[in-house]
Amino acid sequence: MSEANGIDEHDLARLRRCVELARAARERGDHPFGSIVVTGDGRVVEGMNTVVTRRDPTGHAETNVVRDAAAVLDERELAAATLYTSTEPCAMCSGAIYWSGIPRVVFALSEAGLRDIVAEQEGVPTLSLPSREVFARGGRPVIVDGPADLPEAAAVHDGFWT
């Protein structure tokens, strides 16, 4: 690994795709978050935030991509996959990732970095609970690599939350 936090150039390329998905979600009126699941053999399942367009508070990019990946991948494939995401998974999404069996998460913008950008969402304070803390409570290890040095992961939020 040539990058800090266990993140290499392949990971950065995948995180850039997540930011592209976040931008696409924002452009269609959703919150700017995007995620992908990559299997051990390189298959990719993509997901975007759908909180606004589906009127679903659980429609976070990570939860959506876990649901979609579980529909097309078997347990062995999930157990060898990595979930990439534009922003560190929240507690809800971390739970979904944990229960899916996915063993590694790589994120660009940290939960603390997002909190610096948006203190409240629609009057509701953010939930300050880093993904590493959620995963540490589980009975199986989940490797968490991030944050990545990817300025575009913060930039996709510019002006959105005000």
Image (cartoon, rainbow, N blue to C red):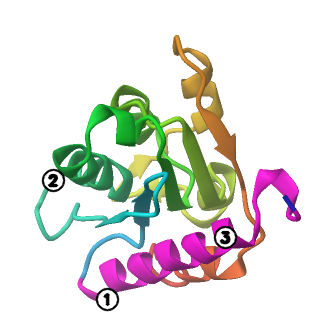
The amino acid type found where label 2 is placed reads: Asp
* Front position in the image: 43 or 125: 43
Three-letter residue code for mark 3: His
Which numbered circle lies on residue 56? 2
Q: Is residue 135 left or right of residue 48?
A: right
In this rendered view, identify the residue nearer to me: 84 or 162. 84
Is residue 137 within the magenta segment? no
Across and down, in percent, residue 64 comes to 26, 54
Q: Earlier in the sequence, mark 2 or mark 1?
A: 1
The numbered mark at residue 10 is 3
| Most common SS among magenta residues | helix
Q: Tell me the distance, in whole angstroms, between the alpha carbons under discs 1 and 3.
A: 26 Å
Q: CA distance from mark 2 to mark 3?
A: 32 Å
**Residue under numbered circle 1:** 27
Which of marks 3 and 1 precedes in the sequence?
3
Mark-to-mark CA distance, 2 and 1 = 18 Å
- Which residue range is magenta in the image? 2-28
Residue at 61% in and 82% down: 155
Q: Which mark is residue 59?
A: none
x%, y% of residue 49?
30, 64
Tell me which amino acid carries mark 1.
Glu
Label 2 CA crowd tier, 10 Å (few <14, some 14–19, many 20+): few
Q: Is residue 104 left or right of residue 44?
A: right
